[in-house]
Image (spheres, grey):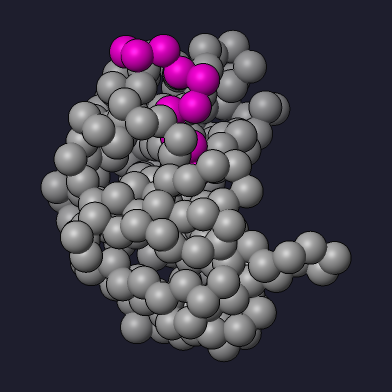
Amino acid sequence: MIQLHNVYMSYQGDGAALSNVTLKIAKGEFVFLTGVSGAGKSTLLKLLYGALQPTRGQVVIDGVNVSKLPSSQLPFLRRKVGVVFQDFKLLSNRSVLENVALTLEVLGWGKKDINKRVYHILKQMGLEHKLNSTPLRLSGGEQQRIALARALVNEPKIILADEPTGNLDEESREKVLSILKEANIRGSTVVIATHDRRLIESSHKRLIVLDKGHIVEDSDES
């Protein structure tokens, strides 16, 4: 499902953000990426959804070589990938319904089907009563679940989450993890970048540790 072959990523004026990374994540896996700030976690996620192109090496997603994909083809890749951003990226002037519906609108769904699907996923999140609220009227935990709903609404093959439990209380953190596990059970490959050791230790899932752009530990190989 996800393959990286000898991937290097450098930003202009800085050292290598990733250095000689080779990695395989199978369909249906649930994987944590961890490491100190600047280790390369967010850079790796950005390569996986085509926000960055590697300086060298190959990134292959569901059989497609993303590192050679023209920009005009990126939207087709991103239909397979749901992304939960660290800062949520919710539109403050749109309702919860409108925020979650965006993904389906891009895919050309009809309004009736969109409303039905959005209500269904928000009910799973326990937030169906917030349909007409705007993000600024929600708590941090609620905003995170809305961001999750938007990423999951079209049941993507791959879910990428960047610090999805950052700054959340324990109850909200457990809810977010439960939602991601349920998506994984339904068939989505899940990759989570996190500093949250409690989250990692309680989950007993594959763990990949990055340090200065290198993979220094992979529990799949231990």
Magenta region's main secondary structure?
loop
Q: Quadrant of the C terminus?
A: bottom left
- Reply above or below: 146 against 76: above
Which residue occupies 61% across, 34% down? 87
Residue 146 falls in image quadrant: top left
Question: Is 210 contained in the magenta span?
Answer: no
Left or right: 69 with respect to 144?
right
Left or right: 59 with respect to 25?
right
- Reply above or below: 48 against 164: below
Which residue occupies 56% across, 52% down? 39
Left or right: 92 with respect to 183?
right
Rendered location of residue 114, percent (x, y)? 39, 44
Rendered location of residue 34, percent (x, y)? 43, 46
Residue 46 visible here: no
Residue 219 falls in image quadrant: bottom left
Rendered location of residue 47, percent (x, y)? 55, 67
Task: From the viewer's side, name the closer residue of 210 and 92.
Answer: 210
- Reply above or below: 115 against 192: above
Kindly give the residue lying farthest to the bottom in the view shown: 68
Residue 208 visible here: yes
Rendered location of residue 24, percent (x, y)? 31, 72
Q: Quadrant of the N terminus?
A: bottom left
Which residue occupies 39% across, 36% down? 149
Q: Which residues are magenta?
A: 161-171
Kindly give the residue lying farthest to the left in the view shown: 185
